Amino acid sequence: MNEIKIACIGSGNMGFALMKGIAATANAQASIGFTDAYAEKAKTAAAALKAEVFGSNTEAVEKADFVFLAVKPQALSAVLAEIAPVIQKRLSSDACQRYAPLLVSMAAGWTIEKIQAAVACGSAAKIPVARIMPNTPALISKGMIALAVSPQVSADKADTLEAMLKGAGVVDRVSENYFNAITGLSGSGPAFACLFIEALADGGVLAGLPRDKALRYAAQTVLGSAAMVLETGKHPGELKDMVASPGGTTIAGVAALESGGFRTAAIQAVEAAWKRAMELQ
């Protein structure tokens, strides 16, 4: 198998997390390089993974088979404008687009069609594009990663991308139509979950636990509960009922959560994030 060349434009937390997972999965079969508007950030990321640093975004696109666009949505337009001529040059010289670089974007609000239009440069040929929505647990290889690909992406290349991404967590191929909802749920969800863990720990402190113990118990409780949902396949309501005995402590706590509109607030949080994702398109 030939070595896969990967470029990551942007070396922030998410880009680094994905490259870290890929490095662990692909081993010697892939070479990774970073580029960043802040050169020192790229050098730091590259040093941590024994990767290389590209001199520019255009150099990255000239050399790579997979180009990860790990920049903020508001910065993506300028990056695409910069690399578009190089992409079109490769499209015109690579027979049947077989060796054209695959752009992999994680920018909220940027659809595959919008990315393809941004790099078209008047050409009718469309660049192969994959869209992903990872979340921050990818930093510890526990992410949830949605994946959608354009029709120009070959089955082999899509499979290779999916296999690489599995180093950062669970990968789910979905229709791009779901991406805004996924952004609101799993993209923003870790922040909501961390708020809940923090609130649980605060409750523990109120009840008399030391802060460090309260936080440890809260985090492990949420982690274990999530694992039960995934590993047993049981509905969360059923697992809740296993704990809530008649007249007991748990049902009293559940009643307090319901009186505070807990479930409504959680639903509205996802809805608000989903609506914001749609506004970014």
Image: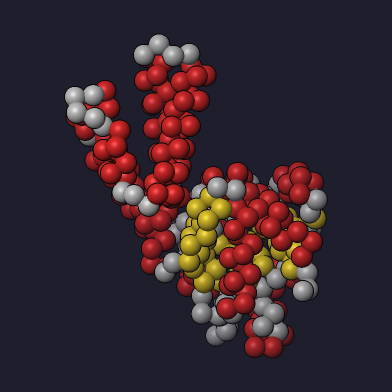
Residue at x 42%, y 61% (from the top left corner): 179
Q: Which residue is drawn at 57% across and 78% down?
A: 155
User: Where is residue 5 drawn, in percent x and y?
Assistant: 74, 66
* Percent of width and height locating residue 14: 59, 49
Q: Picture coordinates of residue 231 (x, y %)?
A: 44, 49
Q: Which residue lies furthest to the bottom in this view?
A: 95
Q: Check the picture and name the quadrant holding the C terminus.
A: bottom left
Residue lying farthest to the top in this orientation:
208
Q: In which quarter of the image is the N terminus?
A: bottom right
Q: Can residue 245 be seen in this view?
A: yes
60 sits left or right of 75 in the view:
right
Q: Which residue is drawn at 70% across and 71% down?
A: 65
Query: What colour scheme does the image use?
Result: secondary structure
| Residue 43 locus on image (x, y percent) | 78, 47
Q: Can residue 257 be seen in this view?
A: no
Q: In this view, does 121 lie to the left or right of 53?
A: left
Image position of 57 with respect to 260: above or below: below
Residue at 77% over, 65% down: 29
Drawn side of residue 24 relative to residue 55, left or right: left
Tell me how many marks there are. 0
Q: Is residue 126 above or below residue 270?
A: below
Q: Out of 146 and 245, give the one closest to the viewer.
A: 245
* Image-based side of 10 in relation to 235, left or right: right
